[in-house]
Image: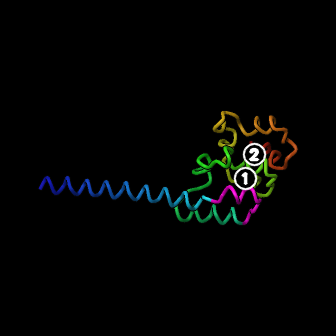
Amino acid sequence: MLKIVKTSLVIAASTFAFSNTAQASDINEALANICTIVQADDKSELRKKMRSVQSDYNMKLRDYYSGISCNGQSLIRTALTSNAVEVGTLLVKKMPSRDLAQPEADGKTLQAWIAEQGLQSSPISTELSERI
């Protein structure tokens, strides 16, 4: 009887581990071209992508934002350097303001990075300043 219980637990645990791995790769596939969408300033396509990830995986932008890097930059930084105003302002509006004020992977906040790059005149920067 004890062997059956142990075997059942091992099978259940391995099945659960495999399903989490499969879901993680599915999410990666779903978000694969998000950098291209941001660089192309395709707001409607970004909305579709965000909606599908939310409905399929129950994840909002704040849940996967920090895990996405486009050539070493975050999505908002990519929008700023690509002059993708519509997508950049959408991203700023969708992110919680407390997350926008946090330092990113390089230890700099978005506002500090914008000032360093001289991008204060960008409409995305203006939207960010209003949100924080």
Query: Which residue appears farthest toward the left when viewing the image?
Result: 1
- At label 1, counting other C-alpha atoms closer than 10 Å, the crowd grade (few under 14, some 14-19, many 20 or more) is some
Q: Nearer the viewer, residue 129 or 81?
A: 81
Q: At 80% from the left edge and 49% from the top edge, which residue is drawn?
A: 124
Q: Position of residue 3 (x, y in %)?
A: 14, 54
- Considering every residue shown, the one lying at the far right of the view is 121
- State which tag comes first along the sequence, 1 or 2: 1
**Circle 1 sits on which residue?**
93
Split into 4 quadrants, where in the image is the N terminus? bottom left
127 over 58 or under it: above or below:
above
Badge 2 amino acid: Arg
Q: Is residue 122 left or right of residue 111?
A: right
Residue visible at 85% across and 38% down?
118
Residue 28 % position (x, y): 55, 57
Return the residue found at the far front.
Answer: 71
The image quadrant where one finds the C terminus is top right
Query: Residue 5 occupies which quadrant of the picture?
Result: bottom left
**Disc sitting over residue 131 in the figure:** 2
Residue at 76% across, 60% down: 40
* First to last magenta residue range: 33-44
Residue 120 is situated, as x and y percent measured from the top left of the image, at 85, 41
Residue 43 or residue 98, whichever sits in front: 43
Indicate the amino acid at tag 1.
Answer: Lys
- Discs 1, 2 touching: Cβ within 8 Å: yes
